[in-house]
């Protein structure tokens, strides 16, 4: 057997370690603590499994580390910048993997739920899975808006900043998107 | 944000109530990868490394299939650990077999009494409890239940010994619920039962 532990190398990652600015690498913990749940929540609204959301969240932050010098606080918040990277990452992911329209029941182990019994949790998971499956049938623009507002928990101003539109536009688009979602659920 | 129109207000509330929490170990994992200078290329599911990993998994599953044909499929990991007193009977003769996606959802789980003292589930053993993907009680209103917890081992094939096993037993030999949870090192966190 070769002495090189090829099988232990994380699949898909370059063996060549590119130099990373130490200060930026140290900053990733701070970024993740502040914005990790928002980025993960946005991605999780669009992805059918926690594993895929894990992978893509990691990719967002690793990209951010390398692009740290491009972040300009004068042009927007750190959260908005990271979510911008997440939007592009999601687009790339869909191009690679094809769009998933199924949200399998039983794959929601990362759903926060205070149900007092396993049966009630299962019912809650079924309701959420049905709702997210309906979201996945909407147009990409509606999905993105719903993901930013509800997945990341952004308010109107933050959502408007991420999308580069006015707040009034966000409100109008969101209510229309929810109208279309309601028709998806109650045809 | 001003309130939504009445016709979509219930949907607004329903969506607003959905919260997902990333696993507790994701942040430290990302930080470690950033410090090591890993390139931000998402793992390809068809990469060479993945194929090597899949080959190793398939080899392990083939061995497991020889012991209990029909219990596993090629994408699953089987973990079998023994022996503790899980049903409250007083003897450390109970084991657990977990079939899971690696480091992820449990597909099937058995609690068994290791009758032949082989240290693993065999056809000679007595299965006390069996479940599918979702943790669920096998009985309700059973008096005298006892809770047993084993932590921390690798119960789901993910690598680190960061999983716990929670079993509710009805002595001397019944088990009414069993599930595993993840407990990252250095924390008291018990992530959702799975």
Image (cartoon, coloured by chain):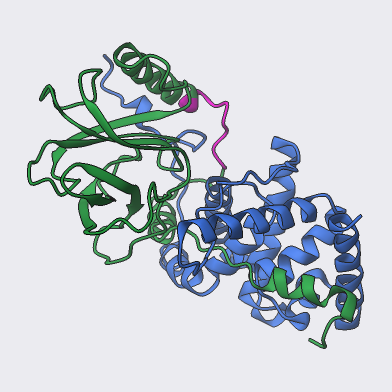
Shown colour of chain B: green
Question: Going by the image, does B44 lie left or right of A185?
Answer: left
In the displayed orientation, state which residue is furthest to the left: B91
Give the left or right position of residue A75, taking residue A126 as reference.
Answer: right
Q: Across the whole image, how many numbered discs are drawn on residues? A: 0
The segment highlighted magenta reads: B42-50
The answer to whether residue B82 is left or right of residue B165 is left
Q: Which quadrant holds residue B18? A: bottom right
Q: Is residue B112 above or below residue B90?
A: above
Q: Nearer the viewer, residue A135 or A154?
A: A135
Q: Is residue A155 left or right of residue A185?
A: left
**Picture coordinates of residue B7 (x, y %)?**
89, 75
Residue A143 on image: x %, y %: 80, 58
Residue A16 vertical placement versus B24 (above, below) = above
How far across and how far down the image is residue A152, in percent? 65, 69
Q: Residue at x 81, y 77 (%)?
A: B9
Q: Residue furthest top?
A: B66
Whether B64 is drawn above or below B86: the answer is: above
The N terminus of chain B - image quarter: bottom right
Front residue of this view, candidates A43 and A11: A43
Among the 4 quarters of the image, the one containing residue B54:
top left
What secondary structure prevails in the magenta region? loop
B163 or A166: nearer the viewer: B163
**Does B47 lie within the magenta span?**
yes
Q: Tell me which residue sits at (26%, 14%) in the image.
A: A1
User: Which residue is at a point 61% across and 63% down the rendered structure image?
Assistant: A41
- Where is residue B167? Give x, y as percent: 27, 50
Is A137 magenta? The answer is: no
Compared to B84, does B4 lie above or below? Answer: below
In the image, which lettered chain appears blue?
A: A
């Amino acid at each position: 057997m070769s002495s090189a532990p090829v099988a232990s190398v994380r699949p898909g990652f370059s063996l060549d370690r590119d130099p990373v600015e130490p200060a930026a690498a140290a900053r990733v913990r701070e970024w993740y603590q502040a914005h990790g749940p928002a980025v993960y929540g946005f991605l999780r609204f669009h992805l059918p499994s926690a594993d895929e959301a894990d992978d893509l969240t990691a990719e967002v932050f690793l990209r951010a580390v390398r692009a740290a010098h491009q972040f300009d606080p004068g042009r927007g918040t750190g959260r908005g910048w990271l979510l911008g990277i997440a939007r592009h990452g999601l687009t790339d992911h869909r191009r690679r993997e094809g769009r998933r329209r199924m949200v399998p029941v039983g794959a929601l182990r990362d759903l926060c739920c205070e149900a007092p019994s396993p049966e009630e949790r299962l019912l809650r998971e079924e309701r959420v899975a049905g709702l997210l499956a309906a979201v996945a049938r909407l147009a990409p623009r509606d999905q993105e808006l719903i993901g930013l507002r509800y997945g990341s928990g952004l308010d109107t101003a933050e959502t408007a900043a991420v999308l580069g539109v006015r707040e009034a536009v966000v409100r109008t688009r969101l209510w229309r998107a929810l109208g279309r979602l309601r028709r998806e659920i109650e045809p | 944000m001003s309130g939504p129109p009445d016709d979509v207000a219930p949907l607004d509330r329903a969506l607003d109530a959905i919260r997902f929490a990333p696993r507790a170990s994701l942040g430290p994992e990302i930080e470690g990868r950033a410090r090591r200078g890993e390139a931000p290329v998402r793992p390809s599911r068809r990469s060479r490394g993945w194929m090597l990993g899949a080959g190793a998994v398939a080899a392990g599953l083939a061995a497991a299939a020889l012991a209990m044909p029909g219990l596993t499929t090629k994408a699953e990991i089987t973990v079998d650990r023994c022996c503790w007193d899980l049903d409250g009977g007083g003897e450390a003769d109970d084991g657990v077999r977990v079939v899971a996606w690696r480091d992820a959802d449990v597909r099937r789980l058995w609690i068994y009494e290791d009758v032949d003292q082989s240290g693993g589930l065999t056809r000679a053993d007595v299965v006390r409890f069996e479940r599918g993907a979702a943790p669920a009680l096998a009985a309700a209103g059973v008096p005298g239940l006892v809770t047993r917890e084993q932590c921390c081992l690798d119960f789901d094939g993910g690598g680190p010994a960061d999983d716990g096993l929670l079993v509710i037993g009805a002595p001397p030999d019944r088990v009414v619920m069993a599930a595993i949870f993840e407990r990252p090192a250095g924390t008291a966190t018990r992530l959702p039962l799975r």
